[in-house]
Amino acid sequence: MTPVATEGPIRATLIDISNCIGCRACQVACKQWNERDGEQTELQDDLGFQNPATLSAKTLTLIAFHEFENAQKPGGLESAFVMQRCLHCLEPACVSACPTTALYRQSDGPVSYNVDDCIGCRYCALACPWDVPTSDWNTRAPKISKCTHCADRAPQPPPTTFNGQPLSLEAAKQFADTMAIPACVKACPADALRYGTRDEMLALAHKRIADRPDKYVDHVYGEKELGGTSVLYLSRVPFDKLGFPTYGDKPFPAFTKTALGAVPPAVMAVGALLGASYAFFRKRAQAVADASAASRHAHHGHVEFEPLRSALMTPFNWVLLLLMAFGAISFVARFALGLGGSTNLSDTYPWGLWILFDLVWIAVAAGAFAMAGVIYVFQRKDLYGLGRSAVLMGLLSYSFVTVTLIADLGLPWHSYALALNAPEHSAMFEVSWCVGLYVTILLLEFLPVPFDYFGYHRAASAWRRWNGAYVAAAVTLFVYMLSRNVLYALGTAIVFGALAWIFRARDEHAEPIMLAIAAVTLSTMHQSSLGSLYLLMPNMLAPQWWSPVMPVSFFLSSIAAGTALVIVIDMWIAKGWRRPIEIARLASVGQITFWALLVYLVFRLGDMAIRNQLAGAFAGGLGLAFAAEIVLGGVLPLILLSRRSLRQRPDVLCVASVLAVGGVAYNRMNVVLFAMTFRGRMPWVAPETYVPSIVEWGVSIGLIAATIFLFGLAARLMPVLSKAQPIEGH
Ligand code: SF4
Ligand code: SF4
Ligand code: SF4
């Protein structure tokens, strides 16, 4: 049931830790009201007098036991019981994260959950600064669980009878009053829990501190932390001794709000800028072509394409097929066994190999948009021969990223909720829509290849006529979904509609410039929004990686990685299929990689210097990882790509490109896993570790194999690769 949002002052619970006697009546009352099963009693030495160990789908409120040094107490130790549960933030990170509004904040405080809208992405679990939301790992449809602040109790009608006797009006009113307060508060026998408006609870908390300064530290936890919460704590010892994280006043969603708020105007600006650039470069290219005697042949830089003529079922491809079978079995196992049964993901590690795989793959697949932009917008027709393979690799990569996401979602059959709801500033929502639309753009970019080759002339003509209109409609839809602002959508429709009209196809040789503009625009948005995903986690991600301008770093680094991968793939194709390496062409791409890498490194290190993060960045184990990422994956390839003479040496170009791809891939690994602090549900107990399961490896490896196999298959069926130029001297 979706609780009805209630107007009125914010309702809050005050938890006075110094009054709590650890009876756990609240824990039991919470279970009873929310109909959650009991848990197996496990007495672990590390946990002391506590059971269960953590919050879970069964336990939404947990009385945690803490012991800390106090020389005044017998044995030199003092203990305290602390209620763990959702704090019902005034600016909840979980709500900001949620791409479907399955989590939403009621105006009077409670942060509520609607399973029908939940896709099971677990971004909320990762984003919550207090590690509250948990997944039900033991089911095939794992929903999110967390305290609801008993938002569903208030609207309950009071009973008319009690023990078979009719209730008096006064007794019914008493029932109604106690029903309207959370079950835990109702159950507490020790005045450790109070419930009322947030103003009343803050006044009460400060009064208690003022009346008994010997009993309380002068701090109401939750009054200001991350913008404030509706669950407030009082304590006799500093909160950090009880495992409470120390936070400032600024709510983490403020970072994503700023980043995502910039997307709709950025779409219009990028689109207009690309259109203007195209007009400029096309005019320049035309002038050069007109002045050249070879102008009659200048179209597409003389490049011709041909299907690859080689046997498909090579030993290498048999291995790929075996790996694909392994992937298919793993995919089936994922759904047969459920997420909990098939992966090693947990509430401590809600995201693992698959999300890492997606982030790395999307970054290195950026070659598709980078090449489309360079070839068409900036009229680098000398690189035209690389365009088809880059687009095909992009199409396959993004399609399989989507497949991995389906495997990773706990409730993928609720994905339609992405189309029905309007979260205010969810980076995941932005990425979902943007990637979904970009896959269609990639498909449209590739379609002329089969259309021309197989003689589908009518389809090719319809494609030429309508692709501009499709781009205008798709980008406008994207901006509307993201902003729900008619003016932004209208502005986008005008900008992209005008571009589509100005650059409409006038003959059958027309360039797919609108698709190129859409590819660059949408990629700029989702590559950067993948960085925005982590803006909600400054508490978890090490300062060498977290920055409020992470989205820009993610975008810039993707251009470096994407273009470098274009070089690596072309060299691999040349070696594997015994084709000559067109080194001049690849060296030109290497020059683009060089500039992208340079801008990325200057931006990233400059940002760190401005934020005073550079001095200690190289210290400790993470400092070593940072140094490896920057030096081996950034500075070294930059040096190797800096001179034309070096770029024109295949061995140097290859090493530099592999290092650049590896550096950016390693950056994403650090962001997703290695540089994150996964505190675990009990920070004072060693966090659980995460090693991907065989099913997680199987799906990932199977999809990589499928990408390589299908690329080879398509290259044999259609003219994807440029005609091999004869090797000099042969
Ligand atoms: S404590 Fe966590 S789960 Fe609860 S509202 Fe805040 S961010 Fe959401
Ligand atoms: S859709 Fe994702 S973020 Fe939203 S509640 Fe479900 S798991 Fe959490
Ligand atoms: S019911 Fe009250 S006293 Fe008992 S454990 Fe819960 S908060 Fe503490």
Image: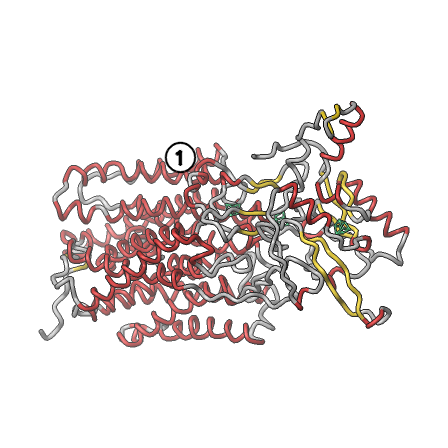
Residue at 70% over, 41% down:
183
566 to the left or right of 92 = left
Quarter of the image for residue 356 reads bottom left
Between 316 and 567, the one nearer to me in the picture = 316
- x and y, in percent, of residue 412 in the image: 42, 45
On screen, residue 332 above or below 269:
below
Residue at the front extreme, as displayed: 164
Residue at the left extreme, as displayed: 730
Residue at 31% over, 76% down:
652
591 to the left or right of 615 = left
Between 203 and 603, the one nearer to me in the picture = 203
425 to the left or right of 188 = left
On screen, residue 39 above or below 421:
below
Residue 553 visible in the shown view:
no
Snapshot colouring: secondary structure
Residue at 21% over, 71% down:
575
Between 580 and 341, the one nearer to me in the picture = 341
On screen, residue 141 above or below 317:
above
Locate the C terminus by quadrant: bottom left
Between 579 and 336, the one nearer to me in the picture = 336
Name the residue beneath numbered marker 1. Answer: 494
- x and y, in percent, of residue 497 in the image: 35, 35
Mark 1 residue element? helix
Residue at the right extreme, as displayed: 211
On screen, residue 34 above or below 163:
below
- x and y, in percent, of residue 97 in the image: 54, 48
Quarter of the image for residue 478 reads top left
